Each structure stands twice: as structure tokens, then as C-alpha cells.
Image (tube, coloured by chain):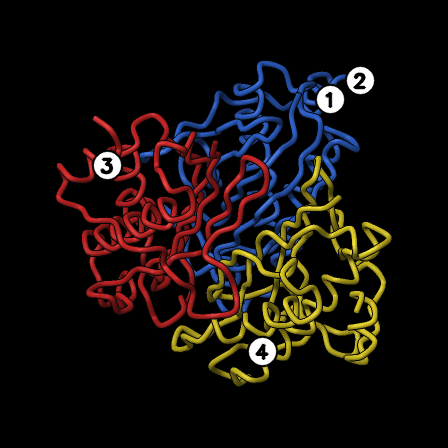
Chain colours: A red, B yellow, C blue
Amino acid sequence: MSVYEKLEALNIRLPEVTQPVAAFVPFLRSGNLLFVSGHIAKTEGKPWVGQLGRELSTEQGKAAARAVAIDLLGTLHGALGDLEKVRRILKLMVLVNSDPSFTEQHLVANGASEFLVEVLGDKGKHARAAFGVAQIPFGSCVEIDLVAEVE
Amino acid sequence: MSVYEKLEALNIRLPEVTQPVAAFVPFLRSGNLLFVSGHIAKTEGKPWVGQLGRELSTEQGKAAARAVAIDLLGTLHGALGDLEKVRRILKLMVLVNSDPSFTEQHLVANGASEFLVEVLGDKGKHARAAFGVAQIPFGSCVEIDLVAEVE
Amino acid sequence: MSVYEKLEALNIRLPEVTQPVAAFVPFLRSGNLLFVSGHIAKTEGKPWVGQLGRELSTEQGKAAARAVAIDLLGTLHGALGDLEKVRRILKLMVLVNSDPSFTEQHLVANGASEFLVEVLGDKGKHARAAFGVAQIPFGSCVEIDLVAEVE
């Protein structure tokens, strides 16, 4: 199955490239490296607001991280025209809006990591750093940026 | 106008390379990539102390982010000898020292992003991640690192 | 002295590659760049729990950062088969689990930075960003990821 067939089987429709709300660009390519800007979690087109360990559960955070990964794929598709041109996802930085008492950032981040492997297979296996931050723009619960190797 | 003419028109004098206060180097080059260490916001040569959402306003944070971007340009100049050798700013990581109630990290970060585009033009357009952190060395309000593509 | 002789002189035995506890890989190579996942501080095989400025002192945090750097070297050894294939450590991101009152992240991070220079010499000199985060997976006190240039 191609990446697109897998997405269809999962009933996922990729969004357009997520346009930054500020003075920067959604992605930038340098040689075979594609740098993708931090994408915040959204639900129904608006920031998915909340802090883990306070308003949101680990499961909700995981769902939010998965939603961000879908948006990141949308941006990759927009950047490359074809997701088959992704050679590998190299690195994810997963920021979890965390109350200081919350220590399951790795489980939240799995929402994105597992989705990328599910859809991209071995190409989706990436290095990662996940940690808890004090806040995220618009109060969103998760933000993720990535570096990919592309054709 | 050259980058230096633009800086002069803005009445900006680039500082020397910002020397780390710890056991690391201000920048490192690998092929066409230049990795620049995190630079903290300073005012009058001392850490620009304060937390957004507590002691500092969004406007003050934005000014601090702009000040960091000037220091980053100073380091790029020192690294390359000539800012015209910057092909593109690829990626900024903007850390905003944030009270958990503060959610305008993107506006603070614009202080750096807008300045880079103002001075470097299209070469200054970058991918970015901006988020709120619990603290920054010396209590500084903003810290930024970057990756640039260079000649 | 080779890297391994230095490690032996320091009475350090490298661990095996640190296996992620979640859906990602410990390292990934792209051309001459090696991306290494965030490694959390451990002591006696378990997460080294605590927050700087609260339960742990700067000296303890520095020791934890050094412990992470040893684990990172273990992962580099596992990735490359031979640490002599490390051309340079390019970039460290050092996350310090911080109470908002703690502002010595740079001193904590030096525990890793000084160790890398001690063992790898000039190849160990790196660019760096160090900052305070709200939490780290498992409540660990320090997390570090890195990018290295390799043969």
C-alpha cells in the first residue's frame, strides 16, 4: 500500500500546508534535509487548548499528538508534492504543555510517533526528544517540529 | 542595499561573537550547515532578566527577542567574516521564559523573526519552533539558537 | 590516548545503546549527520528523578548531566562501532527539569559538555542550547539530545 492508500484506509484526509500565524515559513529545504516548523495541536481548526496533568489526560494528549502528526504530513505533502519523496523522518521534537506534576510526555509523544510508523513504515522511524514545557503558543497542548530526509 | 547597509540604516552595530559562559563553543560548521549555540537576551551587556506573563509584557519580550537576533547576527558575522555568505537562515528555536499563564510565545518570537527578514530579506525567512520554558540560564527572558545554510 | 583509553583511565564503562521506552529509535544517520534521541538521566538503571531548585542541587544536576553524556557515548559507540568515527559533536540540547526559581541550567549542562571535551578533546567541543523545562519523561532531572558529524 502506498502512503496515500494507508491514509485513506485510516480515513484520514490530509490538511493543506499549515500556514504559520507569524513571521516565519512552514518548512525549508537545505540539500536533502527538510526543516519543518513547530506545528501546534488543533481541533476543529482551532488550537487544542489545555495542559497535561491539569485539564487533559495522557490519552487526550496522545490524540492531540496524533493530530499534529497528521498536520505535519499535510505540510510534508505540500512541500514535496508527493509523500513518497520522504526518505525518512529523522528527528521529532515533541513539546508537551505540562503541569510540573506530569511525567508522561513520552506516552503523549507516542501518539505522533506511532502514527508516523503506521503510515510511513520504516521510513517513519525517527529519533526523538520529548519533554514538558511551561506553555505553547495559543495555549495549545502539544507542539511538534521535525527534520526529514527527502529526495 | 547590502546587509551591512541595512544594519547601518537601522542604526544597529553588530556585537562581537557572543562568547559562551560555559564549556561550549558559540558556533560550529558542518558542511554547509552552521549550528549556532543558544544566545540569551541581554540588555546593556547583562542578562535581560524576567518572565513573560509575570515581570515582562509581550512587547518587552518581543524587543528582547530582537536583541537576541542582533547578537546572533554578530555571531554569524564573526563565524563567516561576511554576512553575505549566509545563504539562508534555516531554523530558529525560540525559548520564551514563561509563566504558565502566558500564551503569546509566537508574538515574542516575531521580534527575532521579523528582524531577520527585515535585514536579510528572503534569506532571513526561516522555519521556527517557539515555546514557553520554565527558566533560562541567568533568568534571561528569551533564548534563541539557530541553524543556517552558509557558503 | 584513544577515546577508549581515556574512558578506561576515568574508570568509565560504556553502557549498551540506550533503548527507547517508546515508539522511536535511539539514533538515525543521514549522510554525515547522526541524530541521537533525547536520553534521560538515570542512576542505577532507573530514572534519576527530581527537579533542580527543588529536590536537587546544581552539583547533583551536573553529575546527572555527566551521566547522560556517558550514556550518549554508549549510544554513539553502538551506532558507529568505534568512537573514533565521531568527527565532531555538533550540537547538544540540554533540558534541565527546573523549578521556575532555578537559573543555573548552564552549570548543570556543563556536566555533559566538560565530559565530552575531556574524553573526545577538540572533537567534543560543541554548540549548545541549555534551558529549564517544566518536566521530563519519568520525572528525570536532565534530558539531552545531540547531533554529531560522523565518518
Q: Residues within 10 Å of mark 4 (few under 14, many from 20)?
A: many
What residue does disc 3 label? A4
x 73%, y 52%: residue: B86
SS for dot 1: helix
Q: Disc 4 is attached to a residue of which chain?
A: B
Q: CA distance from mark 2 to mark 3?
A: 53 Å
What residue does disc 4 label? B62
Identify the amino acid type marked 1: Lys
x 30%, y 32%: residue: A120
* Disc ID at residue B42: none
Identify the amino acid type marked 2: Met
Residue C105, x across and y down, in percent:
60, 57
Quarter residue B139 falls in: bottom right
What residue does disc 1 label? C6
Upstream in sequence: badge 2 or badge 1: 2
Q: Disc 2 is attached to a residue of which chain?
A: C
Q: Disc 1 is attached to a residue of which chain?
A: C
Q: Nearer the viewer, mark 3 or mark 1?
A: 3
Identify the amino acid type marked 3: Tyr
Please say if C126 is above or below B136: above
